[in-house]
Amino acid sequence: MGGMMSGTTGAWMIGWVLLSLAALILTVAGGAWAVRARARREPGRPAGGAIPPPDVAEAQAVLRRRYAAGEITREDYLQAKVELEMT
């Protein structure tokens, strides 16, 4: 034996290394998924996740209030929403 690992010990070490790598990959992938899922759920944010400038955020809030109050139609609301997201 003089310094060499037996076949069983080497196989266990390789198995643990592979298991550790799989756990690391799953952790990183799970974290990325969680960040993307949270970004999608936050209202008032564009698809890219950037925070809109204060004037745009205020305009979006006014637009939502006017639609909720029935002052504008659904079509007008959707069109204005798209235009605000492009700014």
Image: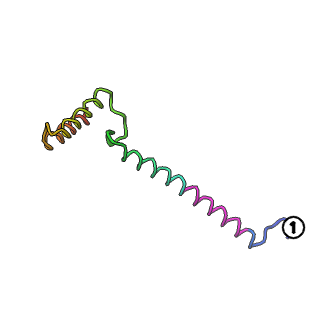
Is 50 displayed left or right of 1 in the figure? left
Q: Where on the picture, by quarter, is residue 50?
A: top left
Q: Residue at x 22, y 36 (%)?
A: 65
Residue reaching furthest front? 69
On screen, residue 56 versus residue 27, left or right, reads left
Q: How crowded is mark 1: few (under 14 residues within 10 Å), some or many (20 or more)?
A: few
Q: Is residue 50 above or below residue 20?
A: above
**Is residue 57 or residue 18 the one in the foreground?**
57
The amino acid on which the numbered mark 1 sits, given as a three-letter code, is Gly
Residue depicted at x 32% and y 43%: 47
**Could you tell me residue 80's position as x and y percent?**
18, 36
Quadrant for residue 9, please give it.
bottom right
Nearest the viewer among 16 and 76 is 76
- The magenta stretch spans which residues? 10-25
Q: In this view, does 56 lie above or below 20?
A: above
Query: What is the magenta segment's predominant secondary structure?
Result: helix
Q: Could you tell me which residue is drawn at 28 percent across and 29 percent down?
A: 58
- Which sits in the foreground, 19 or 82? 82
Q: Quadrant of the C terminus?
A: top left
The residue under the point 33% across, 28% down is 53
- What is the residue that sits farthest to the right in this orientation? 2
Q: In which quarter of the image is residue 44?
A: top left
Q: Nearer the viewer, residue 11 or 85?
A: 85
Q: Does the magenta stretch include residue 14?
A: yes
Q: Position of residue 54 (x, y in %)?
A: 32, 27
Label 1 secondary element: loop
Q: Name the side, left or right, on which 39 lies relative to 65.
A: right
Q: Mark 1 points at which residue?
A: 2
